[in-house]
Amino acid sequence: MSPPALISSANPVPPRHIGIIMDGNGRWAAAKGLPRLEGHRRGAERLIEIIDACIDGGIGTLTVFAFSAENWKRPLEEVSGLFKLGEWILRAHLARLEKRNVRLRVIGDISALPEFVRVPLEDVIKSTQDNTAFTLVVALNYGARQEIVAAAQAIATDVAAGKLAPAAVDWSAVEARLQTAGMPDPDLIIRTSGEFRLSNFLLLQSAYAEIVFASVFWPDFDKAQLQLALAEYAKRERRFGQTREQIQTSDQA
Ligand code: IPE
Ligand code: IPE
Ligand code: MG
């Protein structure tokens, strides 16, 4: 009899870094006849639960896509509602972040955010910067293309100033200028709501990430759903360009 799939996993090492595209709040609400903002509120509650589950599960870093650089195109009422919700979560859960020794980081251009959320956010980033148990990265006004453009500009500036030779521009020079500098690449990217796309999220960092698409809307993505995504991840054989035989030999070494 063959052992259950989970035990014979191809990939027994849990992900160090998970990225989540938290999608489907609007459709969740619409399906229940509720306003979109109620979907976002329920989605925010779910995020708190998933953060706890990741900490308990020994995941080191979680990056969540909260607001894309393209989400400014939404109705003003929804955009401002999202920022108000962000400010509220920060206030309501700050003590919890501190208690669980969580470091908060952001990626994206937060200078464009309204002051009522930007200032407390900057305060929490500062006050948690030495916390070590877990890193929560919130992607806010983030877009991967915008990030690579900024990195290219930084490289061009250094080259023009004579600080960097063009031939010295390698992947580590690019990586060091991304907003994720110093973080491990995501091993697993989860997108909820049944959409099969990355929507400008961590495009370069996900070069070798395993991608799991969950069919449920984000407000329904509970701990059990996270376990399913982790079980799916455990079944994936990560080869990084090598053959299966090479991977299996190096596992035994
Ligand atoms: C994700 O849910 C949250 C944000 C993008 C801020 P959506 O608001 O995109 O929900 P759908 O995709 O419209 O259902
Ligand atoms: C991606 O979701 C952004 C976030 C989850 C914050 P979207 O709902 O904005 O993505 P598209 O527009 O459907 O691709
Ligand atoms: Mg969406």
Image (cartoon, rainbow, N blue to C red):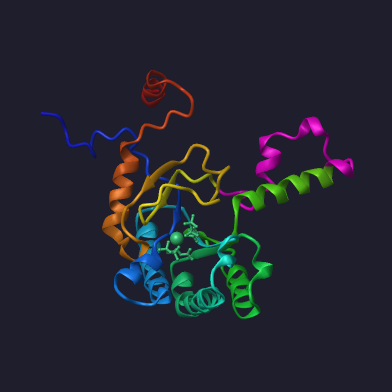
Evaluate whether residue 135 shows in this view.
no
Displayed quadrant of residue 32: bottom left
- Estimate the x, y position of residue 171 in percent, counting from the top left: 66, 36
Q: How many discs appear?
A: 0
The residue nearer to you, when weighing 157 against 54, is 157
| Residue positioned 57% across, 76% down in the render | 76
Evaluate whether residue 210 shows in this view.
yes
Displayed quadrant of residue 239: top left
- The quarter in which the N terminus is drawn is top left
Q: Is residue 5 above or below residue 249?
A: below
| Residue positioned 64% across, 53% down in the render | 179
- Estimate the x, y position of residue 97 in percent, counting from the top left: 47, 70
Q: Is residue 251 left or right of residue 83?
A: left
- Estimate the x, y position of residue 18 in percent, counting from the top left: 44, 50
| Residue positioned 54% across, 75% down in the render | 83
Residue closest to the far left: 1
Displayed quadrant of residue 14: top left
- Estimate the x, y position of residue 247 in percent, counting from the top left: 40, 24
Q: Is residue 71 above or below residue 161?
A: below
- Which residues are the magenta region? 159-183
Residue 164 magenta-highlighted:
yes
Q: Is residue 193 above or below residue 43?
A: above
Residue 52 magenta-highlighted:
no
| Residue positioned 53% across, 44% down in the render | 185
Main SS class of the magenta portion in the image: loop
The residue nearer to you, when weighing 218 against 245, is 218
Q: Is residue 68 left or right of residue 45?
A: right
- The quarter in which the C terminus is drawn is top left
